[in-house]
Amino acid sequence: MENLSVLRLAFVFSGCFLGAGYVSGQEMWQYFGAYGTIGYCGFAIAMALIFLFGIMVIRLAQLTGLEETDRLMLPGQSRCLQIVIAVLELIMMFAVVSIMTAGVGALLEQLFSFPHIIGSVIFALLILTLALSGLRSIVSAFSVSVPFLVAATVIFGLISLSHAKPASSAAADTNHLLGNFLGSSVNFSSYNSFMAVAIMAPFGKFVKNRCTAYLGIGLGTVGLIFVGLSVLTALSRFPGASVQELPMLFVASSLNPVCAYIYAALLAAAMFGTGLSSFVAAVHYLSEKFSLIRRRYKLSCIAFCVITFAASLFGFGDLISVLYPLFGYFSIAFLALMTVSFFLQLYRSKSH
């Protein structure tokens, strides 16, 4: 694969986050919108942390030449911690693919009254088909879907401004696993960044210099900010949307029936991009560790597909409200270790 340009790096980075939870509004509402106005402060903190962790991942991959998450995130050698990181990363990637699969099922059911299970099956088979192309398929998918997705979400957010904001601005019921807005911002950035390490690390060798890394991650973060603010703005204008499985699809339907179909297509593309990237990263990681999986790559992909589809049957909103916060808390300690590793590598590189 050829070196990544600033724009392509931005697409890959932002694509790691623009999945079903983020763009549908479910994730944005639970982590930030439910806290009212103060939730915007939490969102700003989360975006700053995501940018910093994104830079660390790419620069660590450049400085060390490593792409295995368990080795990249640790400042030293610890077999026990490497195993814990590897297991947690794999569980997270399995969970993300399952959540994306459940999201497509919810999307087709909400828009077309299509059986949830059938939509999930179709999505799982599509991911399986393209996952066999490896890393190149991730870049291609994000390069197509991310620009349209960012533009459409921002447009819907601007249109929603024409609707009067409800008189009551009190915060809604919040997720008790998250605590307050500050805890939500740290948790959000933690699980998202931890998952992104496994997806982004293999691309480090395709980022030719430090300038490309900073500009690409920065541009990707700006895209995430615009989408997040647009989603939060839209949800604040349509309070009934927060109780839906896919809040932004409800907003789009309220604006215009045509908007609903347009946003549904882009939302499906976002789910596909995130699901595909997590799927490929997980199987790629396992194939690097185990020769049996490397030799039986196609069979491993099929097994992965079956397991994630089965997990998706638990439901979209329920999976996000429980799994994401738990992953966030587990991720904090390892991101702290990665920060130590990053500064140690910087010190060593300057010493030489």
Image: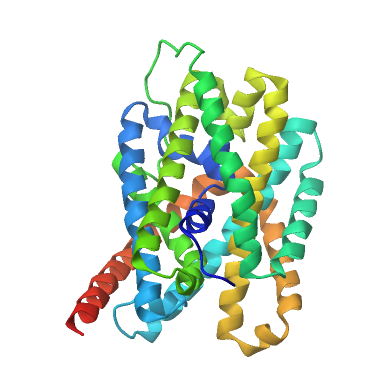
Between 331 and 178, the one lying in front of the other is 331
- The picture places residue 217, in percent across and down from the top left corner, at 40, 55
Q: Residue at x 41, y 80 (%)?
A: 65
Q: Is residue 163 visible?
A: yes
* Residue 38 falls left or right of residue 153: left
In the rendering, at what x and y percent does residue 16 appear?
Answer: 52, 55
Q: Residue furthest bottom?
A: 291
On the image, the x and y values in percent for residue 264 come to 69, 36
Task: Identify which residue, 97 or 173, lies in the foreground.
Answer: 97
Looking at the picture, the colour scheme in use is rainbow
Quadrant showing the N terminus: bottom right
Q: At 67% from the left edge and 88% from the top edge, which residue is drawn?
A: 292
Residue, x 37% and y 26% (percent of image)?
A: 36
Q: Residue at x 42, y 31 (%)?
A: 34
Judge whether residue 238 can be spotted in this image: no
* In the depicted structure, whether residue 339 falls above or below residue 146: below
How many marks can you see?
A: 0
